């Protein structure tokens, strides 16, 4: 007879399986509506707070791109999963503290939250030391919210140039998290405009509630968690 924990894990697995299928279908439809190739858009399954057992059913369906908010949490579950699935691609989508830069560069393939010269310098030093080739996004605080990380829109160009020229970093694109109580389309449009001016082709924007809108505004990476894995505890 199944234990309560096993029953809950089976329920989570079933929800994640159907959730991923639904999100994939919605992504394809949104891309077609925007007259875009769905292959241009990378779906990042945001697995923060979910244990390896909840992630495995999604891996079984071929999903290989995942996002985590915290370096320490990612260290607790992804090394083992990576040993089993060698083609995984791991994105850091949460704030990066200076004391976690070395661990982040070692573990992640993409960092979406570059927003301070100190962190940029430390990442550059770690890349030089390790030889790792990371993809980097600058986070833009499009709503200029004081409690949220990211550079202000009017400072984005100068910061990107500093990363490129002073620290020798290759910046792939921009990332944003719109204010929860504002129309996300306005922020997606602003981010796309900034990226175009800077000659950056990648846009990390859109989450479970608004990724279809983000696709309409040119998102190349969408970060979807609850629509795949369900409500976080």
Image (spheres, helix red, strand yellow):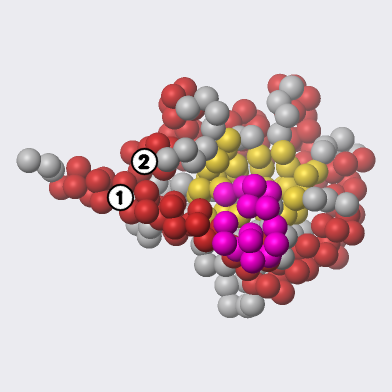
In terms of secondary structure, where does tag 1 sit? helix
In terms of secondary structure, where does tag 2 sit? helix
What residue is disc 2 on? 57
Task: Indicate yes or no whether the magenta region holds residue 33.
Answer: yes
Q: What's the distance in space between the residues labelled 1 and 2, CA to CA?
A: 8 Å
Crowd around label 2: few <14 · some 14–19 · many ≥20 (10 Å): some
What residue is disc 1 on? 14
- Residue at (82% x, 38% y) in the render: 170
- Residue at (50% x, 57% y) in the render: 25
- Residue at (43% x, 34% y) in the render: 77
Residue 149 visible, this orientation: no
Crowd around label 1: few <14 · some 14–19 · many ≥20 (10 Å): some
The residue at the far left in this view is 1
Q: Position of residue 51 (x, y in %)?
A: 37, 41
Q: Where is residue 117 in the image (x, y as percent from the top left)?
A: 80, 46
Q: Give the range drawn in magenta.
A: 28-43
Q: In which quarter of the image is residue 179?
A: bottom right
Q: Position of residue 123 (x, y in %)?
A: 74, 35
Q: Position of residue 180 (x, y in %)?
A: 57, 72
Rendered-image quadrant of the N terminus: top left
Q: Residue 196 carries which label?
A: none
């Amino acid at each position: 007879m199944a234990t309560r924990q096993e029953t809950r894990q089976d329920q989570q697995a079933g929800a994640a399986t159907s959730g991923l299928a639904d999100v994939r279908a919605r992504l394809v439809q949104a891309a077609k509506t925007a007259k875009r190739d769905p292959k241009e858009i990378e779906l990042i399954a945001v697995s923060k707070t979910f244990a390896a057992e909840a992630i495995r059913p999604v891996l079984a369906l071929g999903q290989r791109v995942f996002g985590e908010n915290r370096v320490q949490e990612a260290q607790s579950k992804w090394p083992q999963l990576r040993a089993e699935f060698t083609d995984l691609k791991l994105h850091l989508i949460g704030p990066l503290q200076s004391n976690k830069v070395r661990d982040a560069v070692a573990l992640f393939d993409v960092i979406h939250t570059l927003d301070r010269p100190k962190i940029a310098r430390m990442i550059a030093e770690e890349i030089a030391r390790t030889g790792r080739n990371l993809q980097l996004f600058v986070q833009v605080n499009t709503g200029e919210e004081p409690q949220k990380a990211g550079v202000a829109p009017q400072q984005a160009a100068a910061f990107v140039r500093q990363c490129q020229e002073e620290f020798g970093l290759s910046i792939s694109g921009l990332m944003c998290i719109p204010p929860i109580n504002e129309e996300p389309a306005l922020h997606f449009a602003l981010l796309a405009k900034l990226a175009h001016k800077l000659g950056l082709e990648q846009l990390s924007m859109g989450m479970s509630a608004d990724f279809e809108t983000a696709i309409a505004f040119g998102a190349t990476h969408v970060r979807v968690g609850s629509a795949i894995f369900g409500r976080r505890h």
